């Protein structure tokens, strides 16, 4: 039986690997987005440490004066009021630290989401096709949310735990050097053993985050395809898969909790040893069993040491309480490491290409082009192709042979080996805005969005006038089906083109191109889903629009191919020219001198 969970989560061993230097550096640089709020949130616990010392000293003084000095309660009103004020100040500082930490964390999360979203938008369609949209959405929402505790609570606690116990121990040495030395010895043991436990917590958290992300992606994708699942009777099977994924997340959550409780137990054990050791030392000193001091230990000094003992370990307790936030944050960063690495060039300041394309028809020069497809290996090997400016060529071949991949590589939407130059400019040096303005690509499955037909056409040129949109729609024969409704171009269509057929969606996408002024037009099966008569009209419209431009058409249709100037066929990973007698339309263009 196939392991259901293998489709939900990658191998946990791979997820448990430690973060690389790039990911850790990226996580550390994000604290800059917290700005002043984060710096103040980190500084407040350090200031609160001074009030902790003052509170213990004041309380020890009050008790010493009452028991040893026999001072009446009325004579200690000022000290009592001072103690109350100190306690109130500590409470206010704790509240301020929490609020500022939360504010800083929100700023950091907003900046991270914007950075990751920009990184996703900069990825190629090839990269996006290999990933579930549900997983990416989960990373942007749940993954980034997992960083909240790291910046809001763990970072202030980490700084406080690194500074305050050592400062308290050193500050207690003038009072009693033995107590100070005991704190200096025992306090570092807690972070040491917490780190040992933390390695396991980090790995478990990373596995938990991976499982949660897979569950989110699985649920989102199944929800989006629920209609298809119901139609094919697969809904109950997918419910079982989601339930299995949910159970897996629950199991991993318990694993994380077990390690978290173990971490707390380690902390409490060493903290209890430290506090008990101080209490035992002070008590035995008072009864005369231990005499390591040069002078007697007074009640005030002994009480001060006892009151400070829990406070020395309190920052470490706080750190332990939020140590899981660190593990969760590192797990989240590991989960979207591909997005971070993808934006490494931008972080490093690598300049973007800035060379614009020339105006008018664009030539295409391809040398030693090699394309790979996932699971199929090499699909094109060592392809050379010269397309003069203004040429119209067709590329034939069976499905899956590499036709679509070839024009996607020309549009800089697919990685490749070799070289491609458009208009004499190497593909990697072309300015992105110029590339998208001068090169138009129509894929096999054009994307239509919820809105009117006119809204979808206007995506090609957002500031186009209504007259220009109507003219482009007429060129693409959109009116053939839009005019059958009362709304015309204002007819509403659903998300992903719901409400129009495949051929009608192609015509809407063609109208987007007709609304623009590209120098290179790349079309992938532009006449798919059309009858012969409509196909002929669409091709005639495309050829009219392509006057003065370069046109590359990928097609299965022989009539479409014969209307072009040149035909190539892909076979055996090579691009082979096909002997071709141009159709009457192509011959007429040659006679007019419109095509090479």
Image: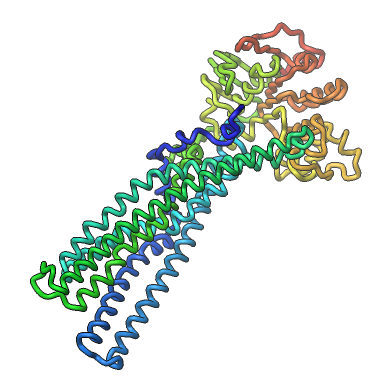
Frontmost residue, 43 versus 580: 43
- Point 41% across, 40% down: residue: 19
> In front: 596, or 171?
171
Q: Is residue 174 above or below residue 398?
A: below
User: Seen from this angle, which residue lies furthest top?
Assistant: 579
Position of residue 295 relative to residue 369, above or below, is: below
Quarter of the N terminus within the rendering: top right
Position of residue 121 measured from the top left corner of the image (x, y, whole percent): 58, 40
**Colour pattern:** rainbow
Count of all numbered marks drawn on residues in the image: 0
* Residue 175 seen from this side: yes
| Residue pictured at 52% horizontal, 41% vertical | 210
Residue at the spot 68% in from the left edge and 40% down from the top edge: 239
Residue 562: x and y, percent? 77, 13
**Residue 434 visible in this rendered orientation of the protein:** no
Q: Please indicate whether residue 278 sits to the left or right of residue 592 in the image.
A: left
Q: Is residue 410 left or right of residue 293?
A: right
Instruction: List x then y, in percent, for residue 101.
Output: 45, 61
* Residue 327 x, y percent position in the rendering: 43, 48
């Amino acid at each position: 039986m196939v392991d259901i969970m293998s489709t939900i989560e990658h191998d946990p061993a791979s997820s448990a690997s430690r973060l690389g230097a790039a990911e850790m550096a990226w996580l550390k640089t994000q604290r800059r987005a917290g700005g002043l709020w984060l710096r103040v949130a980190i500084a407040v616990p350090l200031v609160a440490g001074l009030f902790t010392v003052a509170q213990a000293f004041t309380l020890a003084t009050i008790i010493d004066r009452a028991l040893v000095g026999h001072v009446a309660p009325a004579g200690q009103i000022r000290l009592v009021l001072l103690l109350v004020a100190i306690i109130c100040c500590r409470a206010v500082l704790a509240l301020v630290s929490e609020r500022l930490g939360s504010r800083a964390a929100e700023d950091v999360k907003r900046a991270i989401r914007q950075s990751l979203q920009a990184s996703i938008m900069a990825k190629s369609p090839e990269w996006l096709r290999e990933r579930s949209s549900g997983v990416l959405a989960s990373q942007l929402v749940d993954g980034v949310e997992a960083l909240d505790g790291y910046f809001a609570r763990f970072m202030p606690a980490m700084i406080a735990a690194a500074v305050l116990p050592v400062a308290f121990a050193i500050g207690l040495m003038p009072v009693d050097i033995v107590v100070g030395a005991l704190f200096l010895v025992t306090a570092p043991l807690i972070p040491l053993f917490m780190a040992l436990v933390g390695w396991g917590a980090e790995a478990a958290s990373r596995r938990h985050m991976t499982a949660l992300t897979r569950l989110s992606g699985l649920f989102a994708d199944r929800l989006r395809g629920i209609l298809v699942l119901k139609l094919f009777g697969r809904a109950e099977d997918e419910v079982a898969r989601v339930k299995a994924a949910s159970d897996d997340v629950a199991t991993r959550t318990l694993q994380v909790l077990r390690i978290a409780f173990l971490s707390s137990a380690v902390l409490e054990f060493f903290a209890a040893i430290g506090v008990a050791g101080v209490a035992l030392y002070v008590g035995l000193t008072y009864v005369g069993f231990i005499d390591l001091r040069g002078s007697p230990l007074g009640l005030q000094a002994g009480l001060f040491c006892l009151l400070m003992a829990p406070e020395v370990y309190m920052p470490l307790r706080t750190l332990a309480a939020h140590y899981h936030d660190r593990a969760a944050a590192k797990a989240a960063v590991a989960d979207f490491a591909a997005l971070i690495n993808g934006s490494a060039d931008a972080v490093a300041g690598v300049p973007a290409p800035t060379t614009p394309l020339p105006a008018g028809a664009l030539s295409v020069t391809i040398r030693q082009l090699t394309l790979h497809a996932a699971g199929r290996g090499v699909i094109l090997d060592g392809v050379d192709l010269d397309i003069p400016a203004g040429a119209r060529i067709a590329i034939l071949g069976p499905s899956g042979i590499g036709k679509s991949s070839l024009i996607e590589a020309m549009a800089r939407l697919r990685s490749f080996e070799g070289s491609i130059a458009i208009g004499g400019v190497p593909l990697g040096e072309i300015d992105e805005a110029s590339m998208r303005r001068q090169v138009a690509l129509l894929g096999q499955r054009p994307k239509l969005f919820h809105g009117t037909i006119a809204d979808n056409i206007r995506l090609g040129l957002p500031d186009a006038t209504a007259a220009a949109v109507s003219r482009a729609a007429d060129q693409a024969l959109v009116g053939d089906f839009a005019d059958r409704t009362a709304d015309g171009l204002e007819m509403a269509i659903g998300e992903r083109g719901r409400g129009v057929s495949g051929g009608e969606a192609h015509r809407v996408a063609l109208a987007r191109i007709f609304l623009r002024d590209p120098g290179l037009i790349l079309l992938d099966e532009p006449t798919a889903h059309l009858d012969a008569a409509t196909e002929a009209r669409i091709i005639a419209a495309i050829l009219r629009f392509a006057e003065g431009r370069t046109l590359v058409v990928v097609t299965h249709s022989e009539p479409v191919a014969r209307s072009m100037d040149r035909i190539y066929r892909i076979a055996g990973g090579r691009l082979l020219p096909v002997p071709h007698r141009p159709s009457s339309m192509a011959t007429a263009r040659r006679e007019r001198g419109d095509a090479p």
